[in-house]
Amino acid sequence: MLDSDGTTEIQRNELAQSLGCVPSQINYVISSRFTPEQGYIVESRRGGGGYIKITRVNIDRPSLIMHTVNYIGDSIDYATCNANIMNLLHNGSIDKQSAKLLLAATGENTLKALPQPEKDRVRASILKQMLLSLNT
């Protein structure tokens, strides 16, 4: 549904009627599926029919990698880590081989000896350091 410029506008009421749900459910599903870590900006306007605008963000490689590093923070779970790596791959900021290495280094098997809170902190540290090394 995204235009060539990476944007689409959806009328909430029309989509809700065609799916047989209430408009507020549309907002929740869209905003939870099209997240910033996946490279999307979601804007919505309630009332008067309302709409949801979805935009795919396209920024240069170094900026996207630095944005990802800054977004990670001190801890990141595997699902969010995976989504960030796939976003970088989809945007062409990393190649397939780099994505495989990042996924392997941050995966559950690699960190299985650590307790859960520590896994997410170590995963964040590994991912940030590897991304910074790719950005030099």
Image (tube, helix red, strand yellow):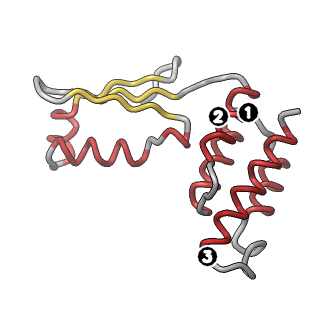
Question: What residue sits 39% from the left and 24% below the top?
Answer: 8
Residue 65 in the image: state x and y as whole percent.
Answer: 72, 35
Q: In which quarter of the image is residue 75?
A: bottom right
Disc 1 versus disc 3: nearer the observer: 3
Crowding around mark 2 (Cα neighbors within 10 Å: few <14, some 14 to 19, many 20+) is few
Of the pair 118 and 40, the residue shown nearer to us: 118
Mark 3 lies on residue? 116
Q: Tell me if 61 is positioned left or right of 117 in this view.
A: right
Question: Who comes first in sequence, dot 2 or dot 1?
Answer: 2
Mark 2 lies on residue? 67
Q: How many labels were placed on the picture?
A: 3
Real-space CA distance between mark 3 and mark 2, rounded to the nearest whole angstrom: 25 Å
Are the residues tagged 3 and 2 within 8 Å (C-beta)?
A: no
Question: Who comes first in sequence, dot 3 or dot 2?
Answer: 2
The outermost residue toward the front is: 74
Residue 50 vs 27, above or below: the answer is: above
Q: Disc 2 residue type?
A: His
Mark 1 lies on residue? 92
Q: Disc 1 residue type?
A: Gly
